[in-house]
């Protein structure tokens, strides 16, 4: 019997970032599901088996990453969130940590940092 492959949801409005994170996750034995927006993720959330969410804070238009995290918390979700961002904003980082993110990674980040954060989120 094979090892359980955890599904990691990736929400980023930049297709190249989503693809590169997806490839990285697949290389480490995870299943990546990619979403271009918070709305796309929410549309599939009820049926998802995601064990962790990699979420861009600064999504273009629509629901921001921070707002998505708030909505998930309000709905009673315990889905661990790892925020990724290109923004250099200490207030945003403090708010992200206050709402309970597992990690806050600034782009470009090392793949090993993301994998370590996911492993922390999954308790492995």
Image (spheres, rainbow, N blue to C red):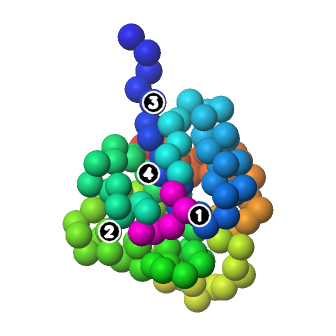
Distance from the alpha carbon under mark 4 to that under mark 1: 14 Å
Q: Secondary structure at mark 1?
A: loop
4 horizontally vs 18: left or right: left
Q: Position of residue 75 (x, y in %)?
A: 23, 69
Residue assigned mark 4? 52
Question: Residue 113 shows which numbered tag?
Answer: none
Q: Nearer the viewer, mark 1 or mark 2?
A: 1
Q: Residue at x 56, y 30 (%)?
A: 29
Q: Secondary structure at mark 4?
A: strand
Q: Position of residue 63 (x, y in %)?
A: 45, 79
Q: Nearer the viewer, mark 4 or mark 1?
A: 1
Tag 4–tag 3 contact (CB < 8 Å): no
Q: Residues within 10 Å of mark 3 (few under 14, many from 20)?
A: few
Q: Nearer the viewer, mark 3 or mark 1?
A: 1
Relative to 68, is 24 above or below?
above
Q: Position of residue 31 (x, y in %)?
A: 50, 37
Q: Residue at x 51, y 57 (%)?
A: 35
Q: Residues within 10 Å of mark 1 (few under 14, many from 20)?
A: many
Relative to 89, is 86 above or below?
above
53 horizontally vs 115: left or right: left
Question: Residue 12 shows which numbered tag?
Answer: 1
Q: Residue at x 53, y 35 (%)?
A: 30
Q: Secondary structure at mark 2?
A: helix
Residue assigned mark 2? 72
Bounds of the magenta segment: 35-39
């Amino acid at each position: 019997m094979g090892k359980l492959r955890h599904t990691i949801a990736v929400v980023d409005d930049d297709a190249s970032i989503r693809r590169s994170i997806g490839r990285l996750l697949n290389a480490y034995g995870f299943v990546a599901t990619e979403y271009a927006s918070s709305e796309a993720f929410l549309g599939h959330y009820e049926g998802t088996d995601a064990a962790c969410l990699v979420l861009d804070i600064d999504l273009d238009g629509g629901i921001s990453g921070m707002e998505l995290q708030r909505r998930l918390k309000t709905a009673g979700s315990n889905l661990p969130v790892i925020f990724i961002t290109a923004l250099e904003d200490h207030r945003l980082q403090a708010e992200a940590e206050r709402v309970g993110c597992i990690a806050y990674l600034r782009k470009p980040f090392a793949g090993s940092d993301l994998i370590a954060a996911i492993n922390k989120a999954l308790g492995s």
